[in-house]
Image (cartoon, grey):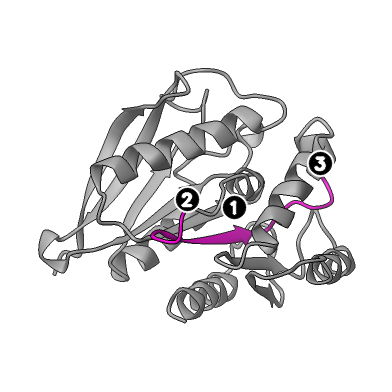
């Protein structure tokens, strides 16, 4: 049975002035879905794009859970117009605009899950928690805490503040997932960072962390991908 119809090579012009290449998976109309997930790819400077295999794995999982699923190429990638920024700020604005554009066409949606992978998790963290009528969740996968300064032209404060805003919002839900064999951020560095986040003054969000044993930054092994899917499945179902 077909769970959804995928519209490939579509495009969306957004209010930031760029046109983004998107893939949108639509649930069957009779299911009356009210859930949207949007997935953000790794750093384009190293070849990241919306066809990244890990994002495809997560797309299939979310399709099975009756989500509208959007994957898109960020500005300057593939057929998306514009140029990549050095700080990620413009990409964050594009994300907000794309979400608002889609919500305007589907006002019945009451659940938004923003999933960012690697560099995409930085951009995902810039998306604010929406009004209480749209429950907002963030899933940050392989957040690049060690190379964050280099990836953002040392605008790390912007991303620290964005995470703090999420953590201090009682309507927010935040899940961090990382592999303990990540090539860019060590297990000890992740542990230190997570401890710091957990001690955020004013922490009110639902905040969960899932370290995955023997998983790398690239989630290439079958075991790592199975554990990743299970972690996300359990969390979005809770």
Residue drawn at 60 percent across, 68 percent down? 170
Q: Is residue 132 magenta?
A: yes
Please say if the residues under marks 2 and 3 sit with CB atoms less than 8 Å apart: no
Mark 1 — residue? Answer: 117
Q: Is residue 216 magenta?
A: no
Q: Which residue is mark 3?
A: 156
The percent coordinates of residue 32 (x first, y second) are: 17, 64
Query: Label 2 neighbourhood size at 10 Å, few (<14), some (14-19), many (20+)?
Result: many
* In-front residue for pair 223/2: 2
- Rendered location of residue 81, percent (x, y): 45, 19
The local secondary structure at tag 3 comes to helix
Q: What is the x, y in percent for residue 210?
A: 66, 75
Q: Nearer the viewer, residue 77 or 35?
A: 35
Q: Residue at x 69, y 66 (%)?
A: 178
In this figure, which residue is indicated by the disc labeled 2?
A: 39
The residues tagged by marks 2 and 1 sit, at their Cα atoms, a distance apart of 8 Å
Q: Does residue 156 sit above or below 4 in this rendering?
A: above
Quarter occupied by residue 202: bottom right
Dots 2, 1 in contact, CB < 8 A: yes
């Amino acid at each position: 049975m077909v769970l959804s119809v995928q519209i490939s090579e579509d495009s969306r012009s957004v209010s930031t002035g760029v046109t983004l290449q998107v893939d949108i998976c639509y649930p069957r109309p009779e299911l009356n879905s009210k859930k949207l997930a949007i997935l953000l790819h790794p750093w384009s400077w190293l070849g990241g794009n919306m066809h990244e295999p890990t994002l495809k794995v997560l797309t299939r999982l979310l399709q099975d859970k009756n989500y509208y699923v959007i994957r898109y190429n960020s500005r300057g990638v593939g057929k998306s117009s514009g140029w990549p920024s050095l700080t990620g700020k413009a990409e964050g604005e594009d994300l907000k605009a794309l979400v608002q554009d889609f919500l305007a066409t589907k006002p019945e949606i009451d659940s938004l899950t923003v999933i960012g992978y690697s560099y995409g998790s930085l951009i995902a963290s810039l998306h604010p928690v929406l009004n209480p009528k749209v429950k907002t969740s963030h899933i940050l996968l392989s957040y690049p805490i060690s190379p964050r300064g280099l990836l953002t032209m040392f605008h790390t404060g912007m991303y620290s503040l964005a995470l703090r805003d999420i953590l201090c919002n009682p309507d927010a839900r935040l899940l961090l997932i990382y592999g303990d064999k990540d090539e860019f951020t060590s297990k000890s560095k992740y542990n230190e960072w997570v401890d710091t986040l957990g001690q955020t003054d004013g922490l009110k969000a639902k905040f969960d962390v899932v370290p995955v044993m023997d998983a790398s930054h690239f989630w290439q092994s079958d075991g790592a991908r199975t554990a990743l899917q299970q972690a996300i499945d359990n969390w979005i179902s809770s």
